[in-house]
Amino acid sequence: MKKVTIIGAHGATAQILTKRLLNETDDKLILFLRNAQRLNAYSDNERVTLIDGNVLKTDELANAMKPADIIYSNVGGTDLADQTESILAAMKQTNKQRLIFISALGAHREVPGKFGEWNEQAIAAFLPGFRKSAQLLINSGVIYTEIRPSWLTNNDEIDYEEKTLNQSLTGTEVSRASVADFALKVINAPEQYQKESIGLNKPNTDGDKPSWM
């Protein structure tokens, strides 16, 4: 049994991961989010601790991490780099080492061709945060797994391929269920994918942009 702190626990992918952890493991979960009452469905679950907090308040975050073996970050936004700095500072404060971090495609300028050009424009406001966060992880000394999903869908499917930084990320989409599946795999075997950045996309979805755009 492990203890996992999930930061940004109201996120759609985080909620899928939470359900799978509760259904498929005996892990205990610390769900950290703003307005924690949004997850009151778990308030009577003895394996779940709900914590209402702000990621940018490092001391609050550190308190939520203290019992944990693994930290999973599902935060985002244009201020992602500031949030990442707080997460890493809280980990240092509490001597935590294992981090699973949701990023995005393009964080390492790894998306080639017309899709890469389109992606640069589509998430231009967010890419600086992803890119600074990627460098913060590299420099942090923590044992991280950075996950770079392609454009997310709500399709009820688990169908993905893994791409290292040496492999171009060309698939234009991937389901949130697939991202949660990969995160679960890492949580179940945290000795894997250490200090790695893994891109996820659905096979055979290459194109200039996602099909629904």
Image (cartoon, rainbow, N blue to C red):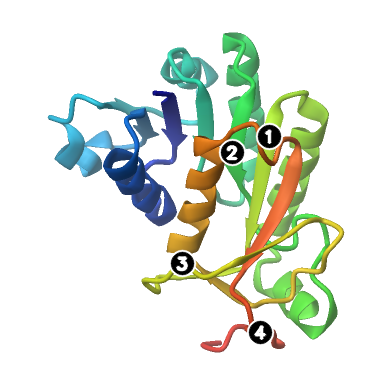
| Residue bearing mark 2 | 100
Please, what is the three-letter code of the amino acid marked with disc 3? Ile
Residue 144, numbered circle = 1
Q: Earlier in the sequence, mark 3 or mark 4?
A: 3
Depth check, mark 3 against mark 4: the one in front is 3
Please, what is the three-letter code of the amino acid marked with disc 1? Tyr
| Residue bearing mark 3 | 158
Q: Earlier in the sequence, mark 1 or mark 4?
A: 1
Depth check, mark 1 against mark 4: the one in front is 1
Q: Quadrant of the N terminus?
A: top left
In the image, taking residue 152 as reference, residue 105 lies left or right, namely right
Residue at the spot 35% in from the left edge and 41% down from the top edge: 21
Q: Is the C-beta separation of discs 1 and 2 under 8 Å?
A: yes
- Residue at mark 1 to residue at mark 4: CA–CA distance: 29 Å
**In the depicted view, which residue is nearer to us: 164 or 151?**
164
Determine the secondary structure under disc 4: loop
Q: Is residue 92 visible?
A: yes
Residue at the spot 27% in from the left edge and 35% down from the top edge: 36
In the image, taking residue 109 as reference, residue 142 lies left or right, namely left
In percent of width and height, residue 145 lies at 67, 40
- Residue at mark 3 to residue at mark 1: CA–CA distance: 23 Å
Residue at the spot 50% in from the left edge and 37% down from the top edge: 188
Residue 84 occupies quadrant: top right
